[in-house]
Amino acid sequence: MRFGIVIVLLLFLFSCFSDGRKTQYKVIPPVWLKAIVEQSVKSPVKPEQEPDRDQKLSDIHRIKQKQSRNKPVEVVIVTRYKPADPARIKNIEWLRTSGIQADLSEPYNKELLERQSGDTLFKSMITLGSDRILKIGFDNDLFDNTDRFYTNGISFDYTAPGISDSPVKYVLLPYRGRAKNYYGLVLVQNLYTPSTTKIGGIQYGDRPFAAYLYFGSYKITSDDVRHYRQVSELDLGILGPQSMGAQVQDVFHKYIPYNNEPLGWENQIATDAVINYNFSLEKGIVNTEFVQLIVSGKVALGTLYTNAGGGFNLRLGWFNDYFSDLGVRKKRLLRSGGFRVTQYFFTVKGTARFVAYDATLEGGLINHNSIYTIPSSGLTNIVTQSSIGFTVTIGGIGLELEQVVLSPEFSINKWHAWGHIGLLLAL
Protein backbone atom coordinates (compact mmCIF):
# COMPACT_ATOMS: atom_id res chain seq x y z
CA MET A 1 0.00 0.00 0.00
CA ARG A 2 2.80 2.38 0.91
CA PHE A 3 4.63 1.57 -2.22
CA GLY A 4 1.57 2.46 -4.32
CA ILE A 5 1.19 5.81 -2.56
CA VAL A 6 4.83 6.66 -3.17
CA ILE A 7 4.47 5.87 -6.88
CA VAL A 8 1.37 8.12 -7.17
CA LEU A 9 3.18 11.00 -5.42
CA LEU A 10 6.19 10.66 -7.69
CA LEU A 11 4.00 10.72 -10.78
CA PHE A 12 2.21 13.81 -9.47
CA LEU A 13 5.49 15.65 -8.78
CA PHE A 14 6.81 14.72 -12.18
CA SER A 15 3.69 16.15 -13.87
CA CYS A 16 4.04 19.37 -11.88
CA PHE A 17 7.65 20.03 -12.85
CA SER A 18 7.22 18.86 -16.43
CA ASP A 19 6.59 21.45 -19.12
CA GLY A 20 3.73 19.35 -20.40
CA ARG A 21 5.45 18.25 -23.53
CA LYS A 22 5.88 14.71 -24.75
CA THR A 23 8.97 13.89 -26.75
CA GLN A 24 8.72 11.19 -29.38
CA TYR A 25 11.87 9.78 -30.95
CA LYS A 26 11.47 8.33 -34.38
CA VAL A 27 14.31 6.97 -36.48
CA ILE A 28 13.89 8.10 -40.08
CA PRO A 29 16.27 6.77 -42.76
CA PRO A 30 18.13 9.51 -44.65
CA VAL A 31 16.32 8.60 -47.89
CA TRP A 32 12.92 9.21 -46.25
CA LEU A 33 14.12 12.44 -44.66
CA LYS A 34 15.31 13.72 -48.04
CA ALA A 35 11.95 12.86 -49.61
CA ILE A 36 10.09 14.76 -46.87
CA VAL A 37 12.22 17.87 -47.40
CA GLU A 38 11.82 17.74 -51.18
CA GLN A 39 8.04 17.33 -50.85
CA SER A 40 7.80 20.36 -48.54
CA VAL A 41 9.72 22.45 -51.06
CA LYS A 42 7.51 21.32 -53.95
CA SER A 43 4.24 21.92 -52.03
CA PRO A 44 4.53 25.15 -49.98
CA VAL A 45 1.69 26.09 -47.69
CA LYS A 46 -0.70 28.49 -49.42
CA PRO A 47 -2.46 31.23 -47.45
CA GLU A 48 -6.10 30.54 -47.00
CA GLN A 49 -8.95 33.05 -47.43
CA GLU A 50 -9.83 35.18 -44.42
CA PRO A 51 -12.68 33.42 -42.58
CA ASP A 52 -15.55 35.41 -41.13
CA ARG A 53 -15.85 36.34 -37.42
CA ASP A 54 -18.16 33.45 -36.48
CA GLN A 55 -15.91 30.98 -38.19
CA LYS A 56 -12.89 32.41 -36.29
CA LEU A 57 -14.65 32.05 -32.91
CA SER A 58 -15.67 28.52 -33.80
CA ASP A 59 -12.08 27.63 -34.75
CA ILE A 60 -10.66 29.21 -31.57
CA HIS A 61 -13.13 27.28 -29.43
CA ARG A 62 -12.28 24.04 -31.21
CA ILE A 63 -8.51 24.65 -30.81
CA LYS A 64 -8.87 25.34 -27.09
CA GLN A 65 -10.85 22.16 -26.63
CA LYS A 66 -8.18 20.19 -28.52
CA GLN A 67 -5.37 21.78 -26.42
CA SER A 68 -7.18 20.90 -23.24
CA ARG A 69 -7.39 17.27 -24.35
CA ASN A 70 -3.94 16.82 -25.92
CA LYS A 71 -0.66 18.20 -24.70
CA PRO A 72 1.73 19.54 -27.32
CA VAL A 73 4.11 16.98 -28.81
CA GLU A 74 7.74 17.69 -29.59
CA VAL A 75 9.07 15.45 -32.37
CA VAL A 76 12.82 14.85 -32.60
CA ILE A 77 14.20 13.28 -35.76
CA VAL A 78 17.11 10.95 -35.07
CA THR A 79 19.26 9.39 -37.76
CA ARG A 80 21.52 6.42 -37.10
CA TYR A 81 24.24 7.71 -39.41
CA LYS A 82 26.88 10.06 -38.07
CA PRO A 83 28.77 12.33 -40.46
CA ALA A 84 32.08 10.95 -41.71
CA ASP A 85 35.27 12.23 -40.12
CA PRO A 86 36.97 14.61 -42.62
CA ALA A 87 40.46 13.54 -41.46
CA ARG A 88 39.60 9.88 -42.00
CA ILE A 89 38.24 10.57 -45.49
CA LYS A 90 41.36 12.56 -46.33
CA ASN A 91 43.64 9.71 -45.20
CA ILE A 92 41.69 7.12 -47.21
CA GLU A 93 41.88 9.29 -50.32
CA TRP A 94 45.61 9.76 -49.76
CA LEU A 95 46.11 5.99 -49.52
CA ARG A 96 44.19 5.46 -52.77
CA THR A 97 46.12 8.08 -54.71
CA SER A 98 49.39 6.67 -53.35
CA GLY A 99 48.53 3.17 -54.58
CA ILE A 100 48.69 1.71 -51.04
CA GLN A 101 46.31 -1.17 -50.38
CA ALA A 102 45.60 -0.92 -46.67
CA ASP A 103 43.67 -3.72 -44.98
CA LEU A 104 40.84 -1.60 -43.55
CA SER A 105 39.36 -4.59 -41.72
CA GLU A 106 42.25 -4.45 -39.23
CA PRO A 107 41.28 -2.61 -36.00
CA TYR A 108 44.83 -1.26 -35.79
CA ASN A 109 44.50 0.43 -39.19
CA LYS A 110 41.21 2.02 -38.18
CA GLU A 111 42.92 3.58 -35.17
CA LEU A 112 45.77 4.88 -37.34
CA LEU A 113 43.36 6.57 -39.75
CA GLU A 114 42.08 8.68 -36.85
CA ARG A 115 45.49 9.61 -35.43
CA GLN A 116 48.07 9.81 -38.22
CA SER A 117 48.45 10.94 -41.81
CA GLY A 118 50.93 11.10 -44.69
CA ASP A 119 54.19 9.12 -44.66
CA THR A 120 53.87 8.35 -40.94
CA LEU A 121 50.58 6.60 -41.67
CA PHE A 122 52.10 4.54 -44.47
CA LYS A 123 55.03 3.38 -42.33
CA SER A 124 52.64 2.07 -39.66
CA MET A 125 49.87 0.52 -41.78
CA ILE A 126 49.05 -3.17 -42.26
CA THR A 127 48.88 -3.49 -46.02
CA LEU A 128 47.12 -6.06 -48.18
CA GLY A 129 49.35 -8.45 -50.13
CA SER A 130 48.69 -8.30 -53.88
CA ASP A 131 50.21 -11.73 -54.70
CA ARG A 132 48.02 -14.42 -56.27
CA ILE A 133 49.49 -17.84 -55.54
CA LEU A 134 48.28 -21.38 -56.18
CA LYS A 135 49.80 -24.25 -54.21
CA ILE A 136 49.04 -27.90 -54.96
CA GLY A 137 50.20 -30.44 -52.39
CA PHE A 138 50.34 -34.22 -52.62
CA ASP A 139 51.27 -36.57 -49.75
CA ASN A 140 51.58 -40.34 -50.05
CA ASP A 141 53.40 -43.14 -48.26
CA LEU A 142 53.93 -44.89 -51.61
CA PHE A 143 57.24 -43.01 -51.72
CA ASP A 144 58.28 -45.06 -48.65
CA ASN A 145 56.89 -48.33 -50.00
CA THR A 146 54.11 -48.54 -47.41
CA ASP A 147 50.34 -48.29 -47.47
CA ARG A 148 49.10 -47.59 -43.94
CA PHE A 149 48.06 -44.93 -41.40
CA TYR A 150 48.24 -41.48 -43.07
CA THR A 151 48.31 -42.90 -46.58
CA ASN A 152 47.25 -40.05 -48.86
CA GLY A 153 46.62 -36.31 -48.77
CA ILE A 154 45.67 -33.77 -51.44
CA SER A 155 45.42 -30.00 -50.97
CA PHE A 156 44.66 -26.99 -53.16
CA ASP A 157 45.65 -23.65 -51.69
CA TYR A 158 44.84 -20.29 -53.31
CA THR A 159 45.90 -16.87 -52.03
CA ALA A 160 44.51 -13.60 -53.47
CA PRO A 161 43.70 -10.08 -52.17
CA GLY A 162 40.03 -10.37 -53.19
CA ILE A 163 39.49 -13.06 -50.55
CA SER A 164 39.90 -10.35 -47.91
CA ASP A 165 36.22 -9.47 -48.50
CA SER A 166 35.13 -12.78 -46.95
CA PRO A 167 33.16 -12.36 -43.68
CA VAL A 168 35.39 -15.05 -42.14
CA LYS A 169 38.09 -12.37 -41.74
CA TYR A 170 36.32 -11.06 -38.63
CA VAL A 171 37.14 -14.25 -36.67
CA LEU A 172 40.78 -14.42 -37.82
CA LEU A 173 43.64 -13.09 -35.68
CA PRO A 174 44.24 -9.30 -35.78
CA TYR A 175 47.69 -7.74 -35.52
CA ARG A 176 49.20 -4.52 -34.19
CA GLY A 177 52.18 -3.20 -36.10
CA ARG A 178 53.43 -2.68 -39.63
CA ALA A 179 52.93 -5.90 -41.60
CA LYS A 180 51.37 -7.43 -44.71
CA ASN A 181 48.21 -9.55 -44.76
CA TYR A 182 47.54 -12.41 -47.16
CA TYR A 183 44.12 -14.05 -47.41
CA GLY A 184 43.49 -17.47 -48.89
CA LEU A 185 41.26 -20.51 -49.33
CA VAL A 186 42.26 -24.16 -49.02
CA LEU A 187 40.62 -27.46 -49.95
CA VAL A 188 42.01 -30.57 -48.19
CA GLN A 189 41.27 -34.30 -48.34
CA ASN A 190 43.19 -36.75 -46.12
CA LEU A 191 42.94 -40.56 -45.96
CA TYR A 192 43.87 -42.96 -43.12
CA THR A 193 43.95 -46.78 -43.10
CA PRO A 194 45.10 -49.66 -40.84
CA SER A 195 48.46 -51.39 -41.24
CA THR A 196 47.13 -53.27 -44.28
CA THR A 197 44.24 -52.89 -46.71
CA LYS A 198 44.44 -56.49 -47.98
CA ILE A 199 42.33 -57.87 -45.13
CA GLY A 200 38.60 -57.24 -44.88
CA GLY A 201 36.61 -56.76 -41.70
CA ILE A 202 37.58 -54.87 -38.55
CA GLN A 203 41.24 -54.99 -37.54
CA TYR A 204 40.96 -54.57 -33.78
CA GLY A 205 43.85 -52.79 -32.10
CA ASP A 206 44.89 -51.19 -35.41
CA ARG A 207 44.08 -47.79 -36.85
CA PRO A 208 40.49 -47.41 -38.11
CA PHE A 209 39.73 -46.38 -41.67
CA ALA A 210 39.03 -42.64 -41.79
CA ALA A 211 38.82 -39.79 -44.28
CA TYR A 212 37.84 -36.15 -44.19
CA LEU A 213 37.29 -33.32 -46.62
CA TYR A 214 37.20 -29.69 -45.57
CA PHE A 215 37.19 -26.18 -46.98
CA GLY A 216 39.20 -23.56 -45.10
CA SER A 217 39.66 -19.80 -45.07
CA TYR A 218 42.88 -18.38 -43.66
CA LYS A 219 44.83 -15.19 -43.03
CA ILE A 220 48.61 -14.86 -42.96
CA THR A 221 50.14 -11.79 -41.33
CA SER A 222 53.85 -11.41 -42.06
CA ASP A 223 56.08 -8.79 -40.44
CA ASP A 224 59.45 -8.74 -42.22
CA VAL A 225 60.92 -6.13 -39.82
CA ARG A 226 60.29 -8.09 -36.63
CA HIS A 227 60.71 -11.43 -38.43
CA TYR A 228 57.33 -12.54 -37.23
CA ARG A 229 54.40 -14.35 -38.83
CA GLN A 230 51.01 -15.46 -37.59
CA VAL A 231 48.47 -17.66 -39.36
CA SER A 232 44.83 -18.24 -38.42
CA GLU A 233 42.38 -20.50 -40.23
CA LEU A 234 38.76 -21.63 -39.96
CA ASP A 235 37.94 -25.03 -41.48
CA LEU A 236 34.48 -26.43 -42.27
CA GLY A 237 33.86 -29.84 -43.80
CA ILE A 238 32.87 -33.45 -43.27
CA LEU A 239 34.38 -36.57 -41.77
CA GLY A 240 33.26 -40.00 -42.97
CA PRO A 241 31.99 -41.71 -46.16
CA GLN A 242 30.75 -38.46 -47.75
CA SER A 243 34.36 -37.23 -47.94
CA MET A 244 34.87 -39.86 -50.71
CA GLY A 245 38.07 -41.26 -49.26
CA ALA A 246 37.24 -44.84 -50.25
CA GLN A 247 36.53 -43.84 -53.86
CA VAL A 248 39.79 -41.92 -54.16
CA GLN A 249 41.87 -44.83 -52.86
CA ASP A 250 40.02 -47.28 -55.12
CA VAL A 251 40.89 -45.19 -58.19
CA PHE A 252 44.48 -44.69 -57.04
CA HIS A 253 45.05 -48.41 -56.46
CA LYS A 254 43.44 -49.27 -59.77
CA TYR A 255 46.08 -47.41 -61.78
CA ILE A 256 49.14 -48.29 -59.65
CA PRO A 257 50.76 -51.63 -60.65
CA TYR A 258 50.82 -54.46 -58.06
CA ASN A 259 48.34 -52.66 -55.80
CA ASN A 260 45.40 -54.60 -54.42
CA GLU A 261 41.85 -53.37 -54.16
CA PRO A 262 41.59 -51.80 -50.67
CA LEU A 263 39.30 -53.75 -48.30
CA GLY A 264 37.62 -52.52 -45.14
CA TRP A 265 36.37 -49.03 -45.97
CA GLU A 266 32.84 -50.04 -44.97
CA ASN A 267 34.06 -49.88 -41.35
CA GLN A 268 35.43 -46.34 -41.53
CA ILE A 269 34.72 -43.57 -38.99
CA ALA A 270 31.05 -42.52 -39.27
CA THR A 271 29.84 -39.22 -40.71
CA ASP A 272 30.48 -36.15 -38.59
CA ALA A 273 30.98 -32.42 -38.98
CA VAL A 274 34.42 -30.82 -39.26
CA ILE A 275 34.61 -27.45 -37.52
CA ASN A 276 38.15 -26.49 -36.60
CA TYR A 277 39.99 -23.28 -35.75
CA ASN A 278 43.78 -23.30 -36.05
CA PHE A 279 46.38 -20.63 -35.39
CA SER A 280 50.17 -20.58 -35.36
CA LEU A 281 52.93 -18.09 -34.51
CA GLU A 282 56.44 -18.07 -36.04
CA LYS A 283 59.47 -16.02 -35.01
CA GLY A 284 62.84 -15.76 -36.75
CA ILE A 285 65.67 -16.29 -34.25
CA VAL A 286 68.60 -16.44 -36.68
CA ASN A 287 68.18 -14.41 -39.87
CA THR A 288 71.29 -14.33 -42.06
CA GLU A 289 71.82 -14.41 -45.80
CA PHE A 290 72.25 -18.19 -46.01
CA VAL A 291 70.91 -19.52 -42.69
CA GLN A 292 67.53 -18.90 -41.08
CA LEU A 293 66.21 -20.53 -37.89
CA ILE A 294 62.52 -20.08 -37.09
CA VAL A 295 60.71 -21.26 -33.96
CA SER A 296 56.94 -21.76 -33.91
CA GLY A 297 53.91 -22.58 -31.79
CA LYS A 298 50.58 -23.97 -32.98
CA VAL A 299 47.13 -24.66 -31.53
CA ALA A 300 44.19 -26.53 -33.09
CA LEU A 301 40.69 -26.49 -31.56
CA GLY A 302 37.62 -28.23 -32.93
CA THR A 303 35.74 -31.38 -33.85
CA LEU A 304 38.58 -32.78 -35.99
CA TYR A 305 41.73 -32.08 -33.97
CA THR A 306 42.42 -30.51 -30.60
CA ASN A 307 46.12 -30.22 -29.84
CA ALA A 308 48.94 -27.79 -29.09
CA GLY A 309 52.65 -27.85 -29.77
CA GLY A 310 55.76 -26.14 -31.04
CA GLY A 311 58.80 -26.68 -33.19
CA PHE A 312 61.49 -25.23 -35.43
CA ASN A 313 62.27 -24.72 -39.12
CA LEU A 314 65.90 -24.48 -40.24
CA ARG A 315 66.60 -23.18 -43.76
CA LEU A 316 70.03 -23.52 -45.40
CA GLY A 317 70.91 -22.26 -48.86
CA TRP A 318 70.18 -19.44 -51.27
CA PHE A 319 66.83 -17.88 -50.45
CA ASN A 320 64.82 -14.74 -49.77
CA ASP A 321 63.80 -13.94 -46.21
CA TYR A 322 61.00 -16.27 -45.09
CA PHE A 323 58.94 -13.33 -43.82
CA SER A 324 59.23 -11.21 -47.00
CA ASP A 325 56.66 -13.15 -49.06
CA LEU A 326 54.91 -16.53 -49.39
CA GLY A 327 57.73 -18.31 -51.20
CA VAL A 328 57.15 -17.39 -54.85
CA ARG A 329 56.52 -14.13 -56.71
CA LYS A 330 56.59 -13.02 -60.30
CA LYS A 331 60.03 -12.15 -61.66
CA ARG A 332 59.29 -8.46 -62.21
CA LEU A 333 58.13 -8.06 -58.60
CA LEU A 334 61.21 -9.85 -57.26
CA ARG A 335 63.56 -7.74 -59.37
CA SER A 336 61.83 -4.45 -58.54
CA GLY A 337 61.99 -5.28 -54.83
CA GLY A 338 65.65 -6.30 -54.94
CA PHE A 339 64.95 -9.97 -54.11
CA ARG A 340 66.55 -13.12 -55.51
CA VAL A 341 64.75 -14.45 -58.58
CA THR A 342 66.14 -17.98 -58.13
CA GLN A 343 66.09 -19.78 -54.79
CA TYR A 344 67.33 -23.24 -53.75
CA PHE A 345 67.63 -24.37 -50.16
CA PHE A 346 67.26 -27.28 -47.75
CA THR A 347 64.84 -27.38 -44.84
CA VAL A 348 65.02 -29.33 -41.59
CA LYS A 349 61.87 -29.25 -39.46
CA GLY A 350 60.85 -30.71 -36.12
CA THR A 351 57.67 -30.42 -34.05
CA ALA A 352 56.17 -31.93 -30.92
CA ARG A 353 52.51 -31.65 -29.96
CA PHE A 354 50.25 -32.63 -27.09
CA VAL A 355 47.19 -34.46 -28.45
CA ALA A 356 43.92 -33.93 -26.59
CA TYR A 357 41.58 -35.23 -29.30
CA ASP A 358 41.87 -36.85 -32.75
CA ALA A 359 38.63 -37.67 -34.59
CA THR A 360 40.42 -39.92 -37.13
CA LEU A 361 41.23 -42.28 -34.24
CA GLU A 362 38.51 -41.66 -31.63
CA GLY A 363 35.58 -41.03 -33.96
CA GLY A 364 33.52 -37.90 -34.40
CA LEU A 365 32.81 -35.53 -31.54
CA ILE A 366 29.09 -35.33 -32.37
CA ASN A 367 28.25 -38.73 -33.92
CA HIS A 368 29.22 -41.66 -31.68
CA ASN A 369 27.93 -44.41 -33.99
CA SER A 370 31.23 -45.42 -35.60
CA ILE A 371 31.63 -49.20 -35.91
CA TYR A 372 35.20 -49.20 -34.62
CA THR A 373 37.34 -46.54 -32.92
CA ILE A 374 40.32 -46.35 -30.58
CA PRO A 375 39.51 -45.06 -27.07
CA SER A 376 41.28 -41.95 -25.81
CA SER A 377 43.22 -44.11 -23.33
CA GLY A 378 44.84 -45.85 -26.30
CA LEU A 379 46.20 -42.63 -27.83
CA THR A 380 49.75 -41.37 -27.49
CA ASN A 381 49.52 -37.94 -25.89
CA ILE A 382 52.89 -36.64 -27.12
CA VAL A 383 53.56 -37.03 -30.86
CA THR A 384 56.65 -35.82 -32.70
CA GLN A 385 57.12 -35.12 -36.40
CA SER A 386 60.31 -34.35 -38.27
CA SER A 387 61.20 -33.81 -41.91
CA ILE A 388 63.95 -32.92 -44.31
CA GLY A 389 63.21 -31.21 -47.62
CA PHE A 390 64.51 -29.34 -50.62
CA THR A 391 62.89 -26.37 -52.36
CA VAL A 392 63.74 -24.70 -55.64
CA THR A 393 61.98 -21.67 -57.16
CA ILE A 394 62.58 -19.75 -60.37
CA GLY A 395 60.55 -16.58 -60.37
CA GLY A 396 56.90 -17.49 -60.01
CA ILE A 397 57.33 -21.28 -60.16
CA GLY A 398 58.45 -23.45 -57.27
CA LEU A 399 58.82 -27.12 -56.36
CA GLU A 400 58.92 -28.61 -52.84
CA LEU A 401 60.17 -32.13 -52.01
CA GLU A 402 59.96 -33.37 -48.44
CA GLN A 403 60.35 -36.60 -46.48
CA VAL A 404 58.29 -36.74 -43.27
CA VAL A 405 58.56 -39.11 -40.27
CA LEU A 406 55.86 -39.37 -37.57
CA SER A 407 56.15 -41.06 -34.17
CA PRO A 408 53.46 -43.57 -33.02
CA GLU A 409 50.02 -42.01 -32.53
CA PHE A 410 48.35 -44.91 -30.67
CA SER A 411 49.05 -48.19 -28.89
CA ILE A 412 50.65 -49.93 -31.91
CA ASN A 413 54.27 -48.86 -31.60
CA LYS A 414 54.91 -48.20 -35.29
CA TRP A 415 56.51 -45.11 -36.74
CA HIS A 416 55.23 -43.86 -40.07
CA ALA A 417 56.78 -42.02 -43.02
CA TRP A 418 55.52 -40.43 -46.21
CA GLY A 419 56.68 -38.15 -48.98
CA HIS A 420 55.39 -34.71 -49.92
CA ILE A 421 55.45 -32.96 -53.30
CA GLY A 422 54.34 -29.34 -53.59
CA LEU A 423 53.92 -27.19 -56.70
CA LEU A 424 53.86 -23.38 -56.27
CA LEU A 425 52.63 -21.00 -58.97
CA ALA A 426 52.49 -17.19 -58.87
CA LEU A 427 49.52 -16.20 -61.04
Image (cartoon, rainbow, N blue to C red):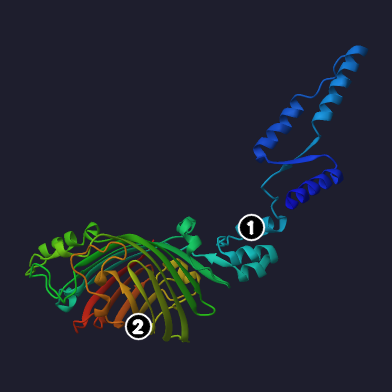
User: Residue 216 versus residue 330: which sits nearer the camera?
Assistant: 216
Above or below: residue 308 compared with residue 252: below
Q: Locate residue 411, reporting x and y percent.
A: 21, 82
Q: Earlier in the sequence, mark 1 or mark 2?
A: 1
**Distance CA(mark 1)–CA(mark 2):** 43 Å
- Of tags 1 and 2, the one toward the viewer is 2
Q: Locate residue 327, reporting x and y percent.
A: 40, 72
Question: Which residue is pictured at 40% across the width and 80% down the height?
Answer: 319
> Residue type at mark 2?
Thr
Q: Secondary structure at mark 1?
A: helix
Residue pushed farthest right? 53
Res. 281 image quadrant = bottom left
Q: Secondary structure at mark 2?
A: strand
Seen in the image, is 340 located left or right of residue 349? right
The residue beneath circle 2 is 351
Res. 311 image quadrant = bottom left
The residue beneath circle 1 is 92
Question: Which residue is pictured at 72% across the width and 28% down the height?
Answer: 39
Mark 1 nearby-residue class (10 Å; few <14, some 14–19, many ≥20): some
> Residue type at mark 1?
Ile
Residue pushed farthest front? 1
